[in-house]
Image (spheres, coloured by chain):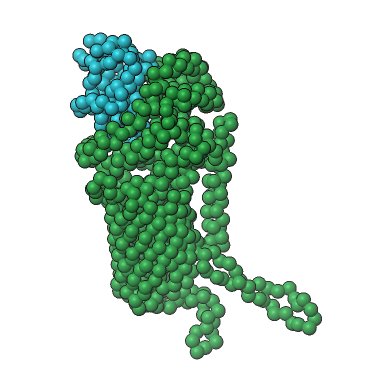
Amino acid sequence: MIEKKLLCLSVFLFLINVRVVIAKPQLPETHPSDCLQDRVKCAYEKPLQRLATAYSKAPSTVEEAEQRDALAEVMSFVTPEHFVLALTGQHPDDTLLSNLLSAWQRARADKQIGATSAGKGTTDLVSRPSTSELLGLAMQVGALTETVSGSVATFQANAEGAYRAIVGQPVICQDCLGTWSLNNLNFFISFDLSSQGNKNLTTTGSANNSFTAPSTVTLPQSSKQFSSLDVKYNLRNPIDPRSKSFQTSWQNAYQRHYADLKIEAATLDAALVAILKPLVDDPKLGGIFKEYVPKFKAAAPKGMDDLLPLLRDYFAQIAALARADVPNLDDRVAQAVASYARYSQINYDAVSEAAGSQLTAEYTFNHPKTQPDTHDFRFIWSVTPKHDKGVPGTLFTLNLAASIYGGQLPTGAKYGRLRDFQFAAQMDRPLGDPITHPATFTLAGYVQYQFDPSVLNIGPGNLVPGTSITLPNDAQVLLGSRGTLGILQAKITINTKSGVNIPIGVSWANKTDLLNATDVRGHIGITYNFDSFAQLFGH
Amino acid sequence: MACSLNDDGLKCTAKTGSVVKVCVLSSATNLVSATYPDGATALTVAGDCTTFTVVAGNGLLVLNLAGPGHDSVEIVEDCGGGQTQHLFGYHDDFHPALVFPIVGN
C-alpha cells in the first residue's frame, strides 16, 4: 500500500511539475513551451523583469540609477549576450547556443541521476555530489553489492530547479549557488521494476456446474514496488562573493585561469564588435532609440504584459538593421555564441576551483523486498584538481557510509542494529571535447565491512524444512557471511546530445551480500537529465 | 575634477582626445581585459581599471569580466580627486562582456 502511494505520489509530482511548467499562464502570446521558437522572450526575460521591477518603485536617486541601468540593459548593447542570444532564434536551424550550454550541463561528470550503490539495479558504485538541476529519470539494470540483479526506475528532482520551473524562472543559472538555498537539496525515489508478486483472491463460485470452484485463487500481480528514498544535501558548495575566504580563493583561481580568459576575451570582443560596430555606425539606430525610449519608460510601470510586445517590435527593428548592416550576420552570431560558451566555461572552471571541494550528506531509506529495511547515512566528498587548459578536469569522489537496520529487531535476533560500514572511491575522467565531452570513463573501488551475515526475510507460505508447519511472516534466515566485501568497477558513460546518458560497466566482487563467491557482472542503464528541458523555461 | 564621459543612458559622448579611466567595482568580479575602439586594440588593465584616449567618431569600449554568478558590479568612470561617475551596474548576476558605445566629438 505504501509502495503504491509513493509511486502514485512521485508520478503525480512529476506530472504536476511538467504540467505546471507547460500550462503555467505566462504573458500573452507566449508560453514556456515555445521558448525555443520565441528566443526574444527567452533572451530578454531577465532584463525585462529588472526593468519592470525598477519602474514599480517610487522614484528616488537610487531607483533612478537602477531604472537607467535596467533600460540600458534592455535597449542598448551594454550586455550584448541578450541581443546575440535573441539573434540566434532568427535562423530556423540555429540551435548552437542551446546545444552548447545544455550539452555542457548534461556532460558534467559530478552529476548523479540514478540510484546509489546499495540495492538492485544500480550502475553507480559511488555516490556523486551533484544531480540534475531540474529533474532526472534513470532506468538501470544490474546490481553491485546484492546477489540478485534487478531493474530499477529512479526519479530525481532538485528542489530549486523544480521550484524555478514551476514559477517560470530560469532553471539553469550558471554559477548561481547560494550559501543556503534549495539548490542544495535533492530527492531521489526508486522503484523496483523486476519484482513479481502474487495476490490471493476469493472466488465467488464456479462458472459451470461440472466443476467445484476453489475458494481462493492466486493471481500474478505486478509489484513495481518502492525500492528506496534518497535525500541529498550539499553541505559545502561555498560560492559567496562577499565572503573573505571565497574572495581569497577566487583571486587565486582567477590568476590561474587569467591567461585563458584573456585569450578567449580577445576572440569574444572581435566577434561582438563585428556585430555591434556596424549597428552603432548606422544613423537609423539613433532614431530607433529616440522612438522607443519613451515607449519603454511608459510601458515599464505596467509590467511584463506591456513590455514584451513592445520589446518584440523594438527587437524586430534592431534585428532588421543588423541584417542590413552586418555582412554574414548568422556566421558572426555563431562565432560570438561559441566564444561566449568557451569564455563561460573557463569562468565556470575558475569559480568551481575557487569553491574547492564539495561535501554532501546523503540519507537513503532502502526497502528491499526480501530483506529488512535499512537506513544508510553517507558523506560524499569530491574535488576536481587543477588541470591543464583544454583538458577536462578529472573528478575524484570519496564516500564514507554506515548502514543500520530499520524497524524493530525480532526477539532473539542473531544480528545487531548496525549492518555495515562502507568506504568507496571513484575517478571520473571525461573524454573528448573539454566542454561537451561525449563520454566519461569511470574507475571505482568499494569496500564494505559487514558485522553479521545478511538477513533474508522468508515470505509466508514457506514451510519449516521437514515439517508441514508454515513459517510466520517475520521468519528470517542468515545468508552469506560477515566480513569484507570488495568491488572494483570500470564504466563508460556515453553522453548523448539529447540529454540521454548510457552507462555501461563491468564489476568484479569478492562476494555478494548472500553468496560467498566471486562475482563478475555487467551493468547497463539509461538516464535522462531533464536539464535539457531547462531551455524551455525562463530566459 | 570634471568627468569626461557624458552618459545619456544608451551611449556616451566625450571630447576627442580626452583621457578616460573606467573601473569595475565589485566584491569578487575582475576586469580581465578591455578593448577600444575596434574590438582589436587591447587596453592596459591595471587592477580593475583601464584607461584610454577617446577617438573621433563611434568607438566601442568592451570590458571583459570574470567572476561568480551572483555578484553586484558597478562600472564607473574615475574622474579623479575621488570623484566617480556611475556608468552601469547590475546585481546578483554575471555578464562576460559589457559594451559601451562612446562617440568622440
Q: Nearer the viewer, residue A474 or B67?
A: B67
Q: Is residue A200 left or right of residue A276?
A: right
Q: Nearer the viewer, residue B47 or A37?
A: A37
At x 40%, y 32%, the residue is A332
Picture coordinates of residue A409, whole percent (x, y): 42, 70
Q: Nearer the viewer, residue A121 or B22?
A: B22
Q: Is residue A391 above or below residue A52?
A: below
| Residue ranking furthest to the right | A209
Quarter holding the N terminus of chain A is bottom right
Q: Nearer the viewer, residue A327 or A7?
A: A327
Q: Is residue A312 left or right of residue A98?
A: right
At x 39%, y 18%, the residue is A281
Q: Which chain is green?
A: A
Q: Is residue B68 above or below residue A125?
A: above
At x 38%, y 25%, the residue is A276
Rendering quarter of residue B60:
top left
| Residue ranking furthest to the bottom | A466
Picture coordinates of residue A321, whole percent (x, y): 47, 23
Give the colour in which the image draws chain B.
cyan
Picture coordinates of residue A429, whole percent (x, y): 30, 55
Picture coordinates of residue A88, whole percent (x, y): 46, 34
Q: Is residue A521 visible?
A: yes
Q: Is residue B20 above or below residue A417?
A: above
At x 27%, y 41%, the residue is A350
Disc count in the image?
A: 0
Q: Is residue A246 visible?
A: no
Q: Is residue A197 left or right of residue B45?
A: right
